Amino acid sequence: MRRLHKMFLPALFAAFTFSIAAFAQADAVHSPAATSPERQAILNALRGSENVLYQVNFIRAHNGWVWVDTTPLDPKTKQAIAEGGPNLLHLISGN
């Protein structure tokens, strides 16, 4: 029985440590890559039904929250069409 404890407890501790590390890594603040589906979904949420292109000045995502600073651009001329600014978005139930 003691031998079982000597083998089981270190294995349990290692599994617990790796699961904590994986959870912490998945929950880290990050900047979605320019071509990632996550970034496209964020910009689509900002865009709504308008046909506008965004210059992303700053973007950070964490745990369902996104802080993004954009400048709206005309899709044809690529010139700024309005003053940009920061937006805070929160993902709720996949929306």
Image (spheres, rainbow, N blue to C red):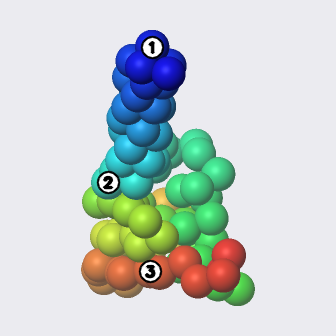
- Residue that appears at 54% across and 67% down: 42
Task: Check disc 2: other Cα within 10 Å, few if <14, some if 14-19, many if 20+.
Answer: few
Q: Relative to the observer, which residue lies in front, 94 or 78?
A: 94
Whichever of labels 3 and 2 marks the residue nearer the N terminus, that label is 2
Q: Relative to the observer, which residue lies in front, 49 or 1?
A: 1
What residue sits right under mark 3 in the picture?
Answer: 89
| Mark nearer the viewer, 3 or 1 | 1
- Residue that appears at 39% across and 43% down: 20
Say if mark 1 contacts mark 2, CB within 8 Å: no
Residue type beneath disc 3:
Leu
- Residue that appears at 45% across and 13% down: 3
In the image, is 30 to the left or to the right of 19? left
Whichever of labels 1 and 2 marks the residue nearer the N terminus, that label is 1
- Is residue 67 shown above or below 59? below
| Mark nearer the viewer, 3 or 2 | 2
- Residue that appears at 68% across and 76% down: 94
Residue 44 seen in the figure? yes
In the image, is 58 to the left or to the right of 79? left
Q: Position of residue 36 (x, y in %)?
A: 59, 45
Residue type beneath disc 2:
Val
Task: Check disc 1: other Cα within 10 Å, few if <14, some if 14-19, many if 20+.
Answer: few
What residue sits right under mark 2 in the picture?
Answer: 29
Q: Position of residue 34 (x, y in %)?
A: 50, 45
Task: Check disc 3: other Cα within 10 Å, few if <14, some if 14-19, many if 20+.
Answer: some
What residue sits right under mark 1 in the picture?
Answer: 3
Q: What kind of element bears circle 3? A: strand
- Quick one: quadrant of the C terminus? bottom right
